[in-house]
Image (cartoon, rainbow, N blue to C red):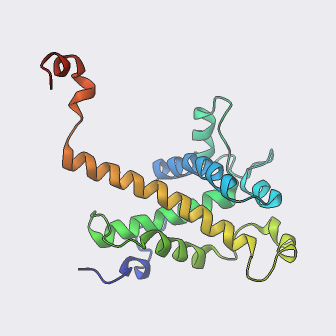
Amino acid sequence: MQLDHDYADVPNTNTTTLSEYKQSVVTYIAGFVVRMVCRKIHCPECQLALVGNDYNPLAGTIGCQFLGLKDRGGLVKPSPCVVNICQETEKCFSRMHAVLGGQLPLTRSIVSAITHTVLSTMGSKCFATLQEHMFDSTVDNYHVFNLIKCIAHCYSTIRMHHLAKQKTFVVNGANVRKQLSEQILFKHQ
């Protein structure tokens, strides 16, 4: 049995960089994370910091190229800070898989532990455009930290749903009703 949140202390040995495939997927998912966070955060300046602008520093990266291929006019392009936070969260999930041997975590506070790890890693490295906005908020309601926690929480929730769906597929097997619906209906099953 693993001790509570042992994966958070595992050094970044082989997960310091993500593969090009993972970078592309994380950038794509980061756009959906921006949509989720915009529903939760109501500060207009913070919402503006989440979305990439016309001058996109992500241009030339593999993730931006993938977004260009997938975009048909409706994709939200995340800011570089959102992509960095999502990539750091993905690295935490990779470390968790390495420690747990591919099994699902057995604790309920896994999302909050990953969120805390990402916040401690990315705390002062993101959202430089919101440094002046810091003076508009109270000490206990620092918007940059709230954004980082919300982004990491939303990404972790998406990943946990994906892991649960994979585990359900392994346990139940393929869904034959969708492929064999006529045969199942004719046999009254």
Instruction: Tell how many labels.
Output: 0
Residue 3 is situated, as x and y percent measured from the top left of the image, at 31, 84
Q: Residue at x 58, y 76 (%)?
A: 121
Residue 115 is situated, as x and y percent measured from the top left of the image, at 53, 71
Q: Residue at x 44, y 74 (%)?
A: 12
Nearer the observer, 160 or 131:
160
User: Does 79 appear above or below 153?
Assistant: above
**Residue placed furthest toward the left:** 187
- Image quadrant containing the C terminus: top left
Nearer the observer, 83 or 162:
162
171 with respect to 26 (left or right): left
User: Does 145 appear above or below 104?
Assistant: below
User: Does 15 appear above or below 1?
Assistant: above
Residue 66 is situated, as x and y percent measured from the top left of the image, at 57, 40
Residue 162 is situated, as x and y percent measured from the top left of the image, at 39, 51
User: Does 64 appear above or below 180?
Assistant: below
Q: Residue at x 65, y 58 (%)?
A: 82
Q: Residue at x 75, y 58 (%)?
A: 42
Nearer the observer, 26 or 171:
171
- Image quadrant containing the N terminus: bottom left
174 with respect to 22 (left or right): left
131 with respect to 186 (left or right): right
**Residue placed furthest toward the front:** 188
